[in-house]
């Protein structure tokens, strides 16, 4: 299992050494020289293990330990110390440190200690998942994500699931809207009832009406028997209407009546059928804009939009990309009896940097292709499709995501700020390294950090 390790040390040489050692072991590593930035990083991201030096400017290792013990007691903390401060390290262990490592350290000894800490973190996470019942509620539906954006989504699911109110899930294609709808269902009092899904874009209006409401025998050519529709089939459970923005105005009227009266008639029938269902809808369109354009009923929009759950695009939660890639790798290596074991660090960098216009669905497709086509036991850069590793294709992908009408100067500034922010993170907030990655001088970088109000080390 991929582990996220945070390393804090004001000595750049040790940071680079630890980062190399741990990445070679298959861990995702964030290496920072500023312990205050490290504590801020813990608020935004999920971390499995923290390795911190004892003596640092601003905050000591003991202060870092105390903060983590108070706010993140499940995270094991390894203390690094010089020979002269071993007593302090022993004292830190009494206050909850997992282990201490003396400088200069043995690489094998460090790796062994980290492995034990990772095992402890994983065991604690499994216990936490079981105690909170997250495994039953989410793992079944493969919702992968530790980012702040996805944690916020799952918190909304937590709050909304017990209610009977309609819900509208919005987001770009491929972001996992149906998975969220399933999570809501299986986290609700209706979880023992059926979950019925309908894609409103996949069927023409006449067929869709019959699919939703059912029909009586002889109601139209080909209706050779009575058929129950999806509303009836979802009785006692949840009906998920995907791409609701594609519904015709005529069907919108009928759906509105079901929401208001909880009754309907089959096509060609006169019997009023009562239903007890929860309706969850999804759209990749701006329904408010559709209302203004007159192609979506305003009263229906407000009926559907009681609970609104917006899903972030994959490019807005890049820290989840390695987790998703690892999940799909495990899936497709099993399906294809493949000998592929993982990704090189360079591949992970490419995947994380790409804009993913097709979101999670596109990432899944890319991983499957790489597993099938890989010539080694590791997926390498040469195994990636051209659009992922070609810089011009990446730029085109990013540009295609921008609206056709925009303020050029403002847009260029936003792009520049985003590139600097990404380079800062990839360089461990080391300004010299960041400036080198961007091909600019350190003084120019400092000017731009001030201009865009970015925090640099």
Image (cartoon, rainbow, N blue to C red):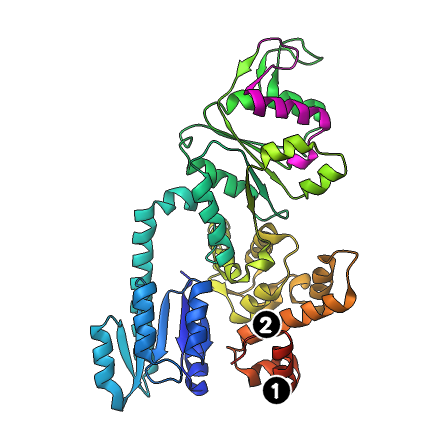
Q: What mark, if any, has residue 219 been given in the picture?
A: none
Sequence-wise, the earlier of marks 2 and 1 is 2
Q: Is residue 340 left or right of residue 436?
A: left
Vertical placement of residue 59 versus 361, above or below:
below
Indicate the position of residue 10 as horizontal and vertical percent values.
42, 84
Report the label total: 2
Q: Which residue is drawn at 47% across and 63% down?
A: 44
Q: Position of residue 341 (x, y in %)?
A: 46, 62
Which residues are drawn in magenta? 244-271
Q: Is residue 397 left or right of residue 155?
A: right
Q: Name the residue under label 1.
A: 442
Q: Which of 369 and 152 is in front in this view?
A: 152
Considering depth in this image, is 288 or 105 the residue closer to the camera?
288
Q: Which SS class for mark 1?
A: helix
- Which residue is found at the position 36% from the left and 75% from the top? 51
Q: Residues within 10 Å of mark 1 (few under 14, many from 20)?
A: some
Instruction: Name the residue that disc number 2 marks.
Output: 421
Return the x and y of residue 447 as percentages of the image width and height: 64, 82
Does dot 2 land on a helix, a strand or a loop?
Answer: helix
Q: Nearer the viewer, residue 365 or 450?
A: 450
Residue at image position (64%, 79%) is 448
Q: How crowded is mark 2: few (under 14 residues within 10 Å), some or many (20 or more)?
A: some
Q: In which quarter of the image is residue 68?
A: bottom left
């Amino acid at each position: 299992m991929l582990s996220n390790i945070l390393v804090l040390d004001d000595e750049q040489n040790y940071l680079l050494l630890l980062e190399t050692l741990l990445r070679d072991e298959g861990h995702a590593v964030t290496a920072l020289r500023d312990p205050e930035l490290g504590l801020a990083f813990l608020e935004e991201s999920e971390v499995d293990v923290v390795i911190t030096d004892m003596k640092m400017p601003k905050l000591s290792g003991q202060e870092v330990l105390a903060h983590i013990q108070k706010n993140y007691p499940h995270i094991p903390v390894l203390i690094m110390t010089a020979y002269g401060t071993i007593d302090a390290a022993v004292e830190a262990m009494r206050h909850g440190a997992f282990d201490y490592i003396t400088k200069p350290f043995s690489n094998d000894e460090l790796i062994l200690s980290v492995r034990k800490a990772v095992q402890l973190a994983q065991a604690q996470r499994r216990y936490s998942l079981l105690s909170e019942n997250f495994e039953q509620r989410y793992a079944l539906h493969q919702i992968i994500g530790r980012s702040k954006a996805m944690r916020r989504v799952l918190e909304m699911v937590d709050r909304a699931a017990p209610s009977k109110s309609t819900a509208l899930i919005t987001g770009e294609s491929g972001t996992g809207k149906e998975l969220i709808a399933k999570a809501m269902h299986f986290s609700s009092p209706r979880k023992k009832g059926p979950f019925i899904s309908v894609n409103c874009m996949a069927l023409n209006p006449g067929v869709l009406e019959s699919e939703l409401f059912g029909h009586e025998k002889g109601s139209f050519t080909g209706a050779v028997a009575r058929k129950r529709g999806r509303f009836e089939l979802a009785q006692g459970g949840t009906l998920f209407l995907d791409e609701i923005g594609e519904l015709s105005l005529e069907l919108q009227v009928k759906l509105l009546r079901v929401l208001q009266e909880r009754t309907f008639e089959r096509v060609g029938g006169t019997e009023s059928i009562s239903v007890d269902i929860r309706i969850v809808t999804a759209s990749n369109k701006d329904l408010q804009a559709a209302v203004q354009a007159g192609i979506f009923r305003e009263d229906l929009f407000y009926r559907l939009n009681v609970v609104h759950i917006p899903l972030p695009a994959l490019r807005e939660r890049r820290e989840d990309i390695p987790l998703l890639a690892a999940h799909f790798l495990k899936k497709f290596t099993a399906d294809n009896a493949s000998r592929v074991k993982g990704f090189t660090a360079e591949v992970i960098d490419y995947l994380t940097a790409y804009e993913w216009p097709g979101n999670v669905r596109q990432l899944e497709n890319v991983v499957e292709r790489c597993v099938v086509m890989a010539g080694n036991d590791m997926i390498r850069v040469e195994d990636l499709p051209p659009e992922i590793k070609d810089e011009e294709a990446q730029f085109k992908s990013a540009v295609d995501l921008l609206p056709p009408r925009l303020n050029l100067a403002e847009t260029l500034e936003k792009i520049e700020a985003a590139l600097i922010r990404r380079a800062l993170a990839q360089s461990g907030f080391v300004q010299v390294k960041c400036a080198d990655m961007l091909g600019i001088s350190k003084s120019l970088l400092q000017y731009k950090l001030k201009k865009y109000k970015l925090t640099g080390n």
